[in-house]
Amino acid sequence: MDQSKQPSVSASSFPQEEALEFELTNVEEARRVLDAGSLTQFDVASVVRPEQWKRMRRRSLPTDRALTGQAIDWLLDLPSALRPQNLSQQFPRITNALAEVWQEPQQCQAALDKLLCDGRKSRKGFPDAVRHELIALRSWTEPF
């Protein structure tokens, strides 16, 4: 094709787009940020030191102090003997979180395992009645 018959294209004929902003980083820092960003609410507690916890903890929400509709439905769907009454009264935030993951067997079992085997130091753990309810829920989810 004849070069003289091709339309001339200049840089000014393309629309100006905003430039992408980026920050230089190294692989280790990127991996650390990605790994920290992929943690679930049940995972965070095991990797955060107590002094960091206050800075990392999210702001309290109304649903931390009361059961959500999803949690109430979940409790009503459970067999009456299995309903974690102590957990839902004393720790509604945890009840709400379990209701969210209940339909995902692997996530649910992992969440219950994290609650039952808390690796954080200087924690008392759950009261016996709550711990027994969590154990019963964990045992009931095993056939999933």
Image (cartoon, helix red, strand yellow):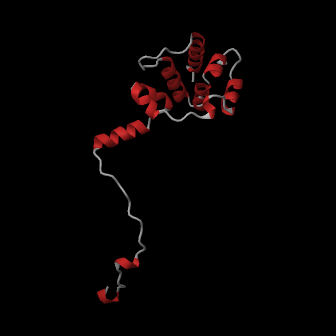
Above or below for 90 versus 54: above
Q: Hey, which quadrant is residue 20 in on the image?
A: bottom left
Q: Hey, which quadrant is residue 75 in on the image?
A: top right
Q: Hey, which quadrant is residue 76 in on the image?
A: top right
Q: Quadrant of the N terminus?
A: bottom left
Residue most toward the bottom? 4
- Residue at 60% x, 30% y: name it: 64
Number of numbered callouts drawn: 0
Front position in the image: 21 or 10: 21
Residue most toward the top? 128
| Residue 48 seen anywhere in this rendered image of the structure | no
Q: Position of residue 111 (x, y in %)?
A: 52, 25
Image side of residue 138 versus residue 121, left or right:
right
| Residue 84 seen anywhere in this rendered image of the structure | yes
Q: Quadrant of the C terminus?
A: top right
Above or below for 6 versus 18: below
Front position in the image: 88 or 142: 88
Image side of residue 27 versus residue 116, left or right:
left
- Residue at 70% x, 19% y: name it: 79
Above or below for 9 versus 67: below
Q: Position of residue 52 (x, y in %)?
A: 40, 30
- Residue at 48% x, 22% y: name it: 114
Q: Position of residue 117 (x, y in %)?
A: 47, 17
Front position in the image: 140 or 43: 43
